[in-house]
Each structure stands twice: as structure tokens, then as C-alpha cells.
Amino acid sequence: MLARAGHSVTLIGRHAHMQAIAQNGLQLDLANSSSIESVPLQTSTEVSAVQDADMVLFCVKSTDSETAAQDIASHLASHAVVISLQNGVENSLLIARHVQNAVVPAVVYVASEITAPGCVKHHGRGDLVIGTMSPPRLSHPQQTLTDIADIFTSAHVAVRISDNVMVELWSKLMVNCAFNAISGLSQLSYGKLSERESIRSTQADVVKEVIAVAKAEGVLMSEPEALQTIAQIAVAMAGQKSSTAQDMARHKISEIDHLNGFVVRRGHTHGIPTPVNQALYALVKLVETSYTESAH
């Protein structure tokens, strides 16, 4: 979207994707479009390509956050801002351990999938919530956030600046915990899941556990608002399967350790039972074990 709006964008990624994009552009199938658009982009497979960037969009899986942060650290320009566009609540802190630059946490709400190398299918939404870490490592935090928001807005990506991004991150974590594992295990879309009362009840139990753990972490969330959000996501992204479902369909290790697994670990630390999150986490890990066993 940034490249479509005329911004200079370089994608850094695996060879198959970068080769396809270099040859054919990024093939973008937007939900509100009847045709596939080809977006020309600069590509690289080398992390050193971040060296001239003013803004680095950090989009790796949570399982790779620390490794990727270590890889780019020595190549970042001193003024560059790293924006974490990831699931989970701890990625910005993990990145900040390894880079000296300002790290801006972002919450992403988009339904999309990679259908083939260099091809992205968009199912719905595409909006961000951004905020600052504490400390922000920015001379003028609000101005920087406004500048970032303006860049995305120019690319028709809606951005909201939050005074408490940690609440926003936990809210997104709650959504991920309610949908990702169940969608992954069943390989069903959000809309299909919401049709079953037993699943809605299970999701409500997940939400209660996440809210209890968040409270112990100093983050207050409203249960009625949380349940309303779950219902709205099921409608707004009815045809979407979770990223965990996409990973499991490809026999790839998912981010479940940073979703339900994170809630289980933090719950254990605070002495808060999380049996539903524990069950979902254990089931996904059990299925993932079969991938590694079959690979040997």
C-alpha cells in the first residue's frame, strides 16, 4: 500500500518471494477489487538493505523476533524507527533489547494470506493502532507518531494513535487467543466458528482468562467490550482463517507460544489458572510435534 502511494519501499525476505516480486511485482488481490494488481517494489534477501531506511516495518513471526532484531541491529541508520507489526505483546521489548533505535509497537487488524510466492490475497480490513514504548527513545514522541500515521494515511491505511498501546496489544492478543488455535485446529474460518454456540462459549472462557492475566500485568480490559470485539471480528473477517490455521495447513510451526502459550506462562507466574488457553495451546503443540516427527 505504501509503494502504491509512491513511497520508496524495499522488501526484505526469503529468496522465492523476492525473486517472484522482482520479476512480476507484488501480486495484490484486494478484497474490494475485481482484478489483481501488480505493485513494483525493490527487493532484497540481505538484512543490510535496511541501512538507508527511515522506517523499518518489522513483520517477522514472533518466534523470529530476537534473531531478526540481532541481524538488522548493526545496519540500521541512527535515525531509523522500527515499527513492530506483529502478534503478541512482547515483541517491541524483545526487539529493543537488540537495537538502539526507537521501537514503535503497532497493532494490526487485517485479514490476508500469502497464496503463492509474491502473491497476497486481502480478505478485509487493514488498519493500525500505534503508540510508544516506555521509555520511547524519541525526542518528540507525539510528532513522530503523527508523522508515521500521516505516511500510512497517505497510502489509505487507517491509523489510530493510542495513549496506552499496551491495552491495545493485549486486546489484539485476546482476539488471537480466541480465534487462532481454534481456527487452526479446525481449519475453519472465523464466520464458521461463530455459528457454533459451543465455540462462542469456549471463546468467552478464553477471554475471561486473558483478562484476568492482563489485570495481573497491570492492564485493565472490559469483558463486555472484549466479547463484543470477538463478535465484530467474526463478522468483519467472516471468511478469514487465522495465521495459525495457515501455518498448520502448511505444516509450519506457528506463533502459539506467543499467543495462548504466553497467557499460560504469565498466568502461571501470577498464580492464575488458564485451563482453556492451556488446552488450546497443548493441542496445537501436539499437532506441531507431528510435523517435526514426520520430517525425520
Image: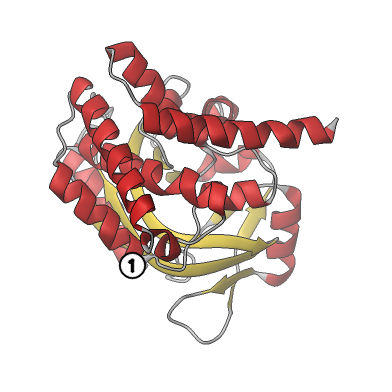
Q: Secondary structure at mark 1?
A: helix
**Visible residue check, residue 153:** yes
Q: Where residue 223 sits in the image (x, y, percent)? A: 16, 42
Relative height, residue 174 to residue 151 (above, below):
above
Residue lying at the far bottom of the rendered structure? 34
**Visible residue check, residue 78:** no
* 185 or 101, nearer to the observer: 185
Identified at 42% across, 41% down, the residue is 87
User: Which amino acid does the dot numbered 1 rest on?
Assistant: Ala
* 113 or 215, nearer to the observer: 215
Position of the N terminus, as image quadrant, is bottom left
* 135 or 230, nearer to the observer: 230
Please identify the quarter of the rendering in which residue 160 is found: bottom left
Residue lying at the far right of the rendered structure? 296
- From the viewer's perspective, tell me whether residue 221 is left or right of residue 61: left
Q: Where residue 235 sits in the image (x, y, percent)? A: 32, 67
Check disc 1 and report the residue beneath it. 236
Q: Where residue 145 sits in the image (x, y, percent)? A: 24, 46
Identified at 49% across, 32% down, the residue is 281
Position of the C terminus, as image quadrant, is top right
Q: Callout 1: few (<14), some (14-19), or many (20+) C-alpha neighbours within 10 Å?
A: some
Identified at 47% across, 47% down, the residue is 182
